[in-house]
Amino acid sequence: MATIRIPTPLRPYTGNNGQVTVNGGTVGSALADLTDQYPDLRPHLFEGDTLRSFVNVYLNQEDVRHLQGPQTAVAADDTLMIIPSIAGG
Amino acid sequence: MLSPVYQPVYRPKSITARPQTQAQRLEELIGNTPLLDLSHTAVAHGLSPRVALFAKAEWFNPGGSVKDRAALNIIRTAEKDGSLHPGMTLIDSTSGNTGIAYAMLGAARGYRVKLVVPQNISPERLAILRAYGAELIFTDPLDGSDGALEEARRLAAADPTLFYARQYDNPANWRAHYLTTANEIWQQTDGTITHFVAGMGTSGTFMGTMRRLKELNPAILGHAVQPDSPFNGLEGLKHMPTAIKPGIYDESLADDVRTVRTEDAYKMARFLARHEGVFVGISAAAAVWAATAVGQKLEAGTIVTILPDSGLKYLSERFWSE
Ligand SMILES: Cc1ncc(COP(=O)(O)O)c(C=O)c1O
């Protein structure tokens, strides 16, 4: 079971959890399991089946777009992070 | 008859008096930005020919963004009231543009500048801040701008020798726009502005400009622009319902709040670059998107919006090629 760290602005949709453990052997299936657990999250992250273009997912500090995207393999002790963009000021 | 040949008379100049030249100090270049006519955008988005759409090109400021105005007024106000003097270090949290403005002005005026920024700050902003010599303190990217704000408060409280600029709570932020932006808009539209549309980060731009515009003509309507969701790609804007509310934010100044979806702002950024020749950042595109939505409901009027910065700091984003 990998861990996904949730940024503050998305915590209202995860019952205020800052991290969620998920099933799935790839980034795509891990995110699918996350949004199955918390369906209200889905429209914030996905447009149809694709990740919205401003949503950045990091696997152990590396942007998954620079790895194999949704097909990137995820091990049980890996941590995924969903990174927000930077708000005003 | 030929006129006599003009012979300039060269007189030796005193070496002690400063010559009368056109040279200016950096901070004199802040403000008085051009007002752009976005008529192609207006027509393409179905606005009536009697609705004008104009926008302030804030990247003409020397630091490249609208935030030069706020940073300059915050620094000048603090110098006047004695809370900031030479040799001191200024600290604040920032998403980038205010930090760039502080770093530029600090370098020009002899202050050290310490900035608290979320670690996922864009590579372009990071490179600019480093070029100006600012000291950077990084906070957890998962905590966003509010995490940086809390860390700046903590650091400032722990070290009273720092000047804490407090852009979210400092009235000198909105007063910059009350004193400059609003009056420029009034003059540049010959007093014909009917609607003002602007995004909100600290809310300084919207608060200050609207306060002054309402004094000049109480019938002018203010439309504040916000992201549609707390999780969005509209860098520079704040989702007020879920973020730490800025001390300077007064929601009663907005006659209307427009929410913008990130994908619509991206689309407008591409449209402005490709059909208007105006290459702007994401929050600028969001403001123009909202301004066209306001305009579609009007039969006649003059809409003015703010383009906080250019597209240069967003070149590493993927949406330009989508
Ligand atoms: C790109 C961008 N847009 C909009 C804003 C919002 O301006 P204000 O803080 O005056 O509300 C900022 C603030 O830093 C910004 O950097």
Image (cartoon, rainbow, N blue to C red):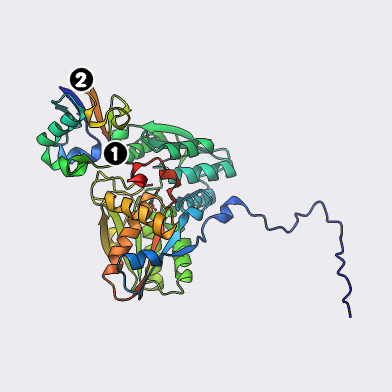
A64 lies above or below B294: above
Q: Where residue B175 sits in the image (x, y, percent)?
A: 44, 58
Q: Nearer the viewer, mark 2 or mark 1?
A: 2
Does the image show residue B155?
yes
Residue under mark 1: which chain is it in? Answer: A
Label 1, residues with CA under 10 Å away: few <14, some 14-19, many ≥20:
many
Does the image show residue B203?
no
Same chain under badges 2 and 1? The reply is: yes
Label 2, residues with CA under 10 Å away: few <14, some 14-19, many ≥20:
some
Q: Residue B38: which quarter of the image?
A: bottom left
Question: Considering the image in quadrants, where does the N terminus of chain B appear?
Answer: bottom right
Q: Where residue B119 sits in the image (x, y, percent)?
A: 37, 33
Q: Which of pointers 2 and 1 lies earlier in the amino acid sequence? A: 2
Of the residues shown, which amino acid type is indicated by label 1? Pro
Q: Residue A22: which quarter of the image?
A: top left
SS class of the residue under badge 1? loop
Q: Where residue A38 sits in the image (x, y, percent)?
A: 12, 37
A73 lies above or below B250: above
Left or right position of B128 against B207 = right
Q: Residue A84, labelled with which disc? A: 1
What's the distance in space between the residues labelled 2 and 1, CA to CA? 23 Å
- Residue at left offset 39%, top offset 42%: B95
